[in-house]
Amino acid sequence: MDWQKDYYSKFKNADEAVKVVKSGDTVAYGEFVMVSKYLDAALAERISELNNITLRATSCPFPPKVVLADPKMERVTYNDWHFSGASRKLSDQNLCRYIPLNYHVGPNILKSGLVGKVDVAMFMMGPPDENGYLNLGTSSSITPAYISVAKHVIVEINENIPYCFSDESCRIHVSQIDCFVQGPNSPLIEVPSPPPTEVDKKIAELVVNQICDGACIQLGIGAMPNAVGTLIGQSGLRDLGVHTEMLCDAYVSMYEAGCITGKYKTTDPGKILYTFAVGTKKLYSFLDNNPECVIAPVDYTNDPYIISQNDNMVCLNNALEIDLYGQIASESTGYRQISGTGGQLDFIIAAAHSKGGKGLICLSSTYTDGYGNLHSRIKGTMDPCTIVTVPRSYAPIVITEYGVADLRGRTTWERAELLVNIAHPDFREELIKEAEKNHIWDTRKY
């Protein structure tokens, strides 16, 4: 088959391409920085003609124009598998709904039809290679699953997308796509990590002490993981492997410092494995035509069984708060959705099953609210409506700037003591009183 002839015959302008969307349709957007702003803008122009549209995205980094064009949510229902900052702001206006998900099961949910039909899927990708296979760019995640179930697939071609090497399951051929649109070749959206605070740096020092030569690591996004990556680069640690959900700038720093070789990985030895990348031009340039980095679908990268085959798997994630029982909240404060479950529980479970593995939950001991009041992130019990991301039965190692609390295998009484000891000193007495009230404080020792 002449794939080039097939490819060029499928091109349309954006306005014509999105006419395939009909009232009552479910429309899937891309994921993270691979969401097509161009197709979103074209569809937004048609919203007044449409009704009962269900839109799904995964951590869309900007407020979709389709949603902004329908501020009373009369025509569009917007759902996000994992909240971005933009989704959170829309949710505060009742314009975005969260889909609870352990990330690795996303492809299976789509393929099983549990969430119904997918009428139209829209993605941004790089141009095809010499064999007609498209470049998925910086996100695989659940994209291949969407393409396998969608009735109609539209792809914006962007020649500025870094060429990212992928495993076989991410190889999407021109023949699998119904329509192509030439985009404006805009640079990828950059999402820099905020600079680390002094608290982040203290926590990062404690984290680095938990990592050994030859360990396999996973880091989340944010200032603190970025600080960890910087410290690892300065630590002298060697032969680290990478099996992660998200790739960020911190990994580039570690690689450039000679820390990452993947020599001792059991799965994908020698490769930096990830399912999506979010960062700055530094990261995107590092990924471009780099065969040492391999992108794979999330049902592979986040499968706890696959992850745990790597010895000394160190999985580092953030949290919003933790209670004295070891319940970890990483996605909501009360009823307000801040982020999503994502792969946090996937990797915490994996670390628990890895030989020498460690799950690390890192958080500052306090936060300051909008009125300037200081609050403890370590609670006696969870606030009403706060969503538990990691159940106490999988509570791992918790780190604040005041120390390390290894909760694995500990009783509720022992956990309370360990967590009080790493809480901010101003809140320790209050936490002890709450622990006593809940009968999880050993008064014989104090």
Image (spheres, helix red, strand yellow):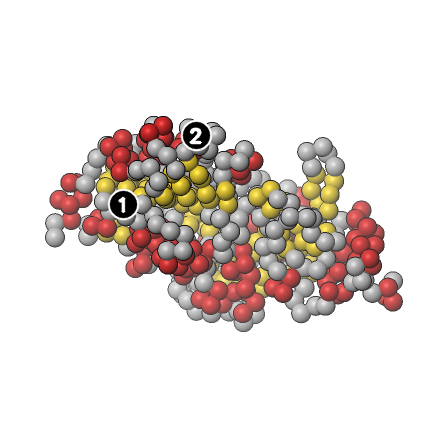
Residue ID at (72%, 54%): 381
Check the picture and name the quadrant holding the C terminus: bottom right
> Which residue is disc 2 drawn over?
70
Expressed as whole percent of the image width and height from the top left, the position of residue 50 reads 34, 33
Q: Which label sits on residue 152?
A: 1
Crowding at mark 1 (Cα within 10 Å: few <14, some 14-19, many 20+): some
Disc 2 residue type (three-letter): Asp
* Nearer to us in this view, 296 or 227: 296
Expressed as whole percent of the image width and height from the top left, the position of residue 29 reads 37, 42
Expressed as whole percent of the image width and height from the top left, the position of residue 249 reads 48, 46
Q: Element type at marker 2?
A: loop
* Nearer to us in this view, 409 or 337: 337
- Number of numbered callouts drawn: 2
- Confirm or deny contact between disc 1 and disc 2 (CB under 8 A): no
Disc 1 residue type (three-letter): His
Q: Element type at marker 1?
A: strand
Q: Answer yes or no: is residue 324 visible.
A: yes
When asked about the image quadrant of residue 272, the answer is: bottom left
Residue ID at (41%, 52%): 115
Q: What is the spatial separation of the Cα atoms under label 1 and label 2, in whole angstroms? A: 24 Å
Crowding at mark 2 (Cα within 10 Å: few <14, some 14-19, many 20+): some
* Nearer to us in this view, 311 or 333: 333
Left or right for 345, reference 265: right
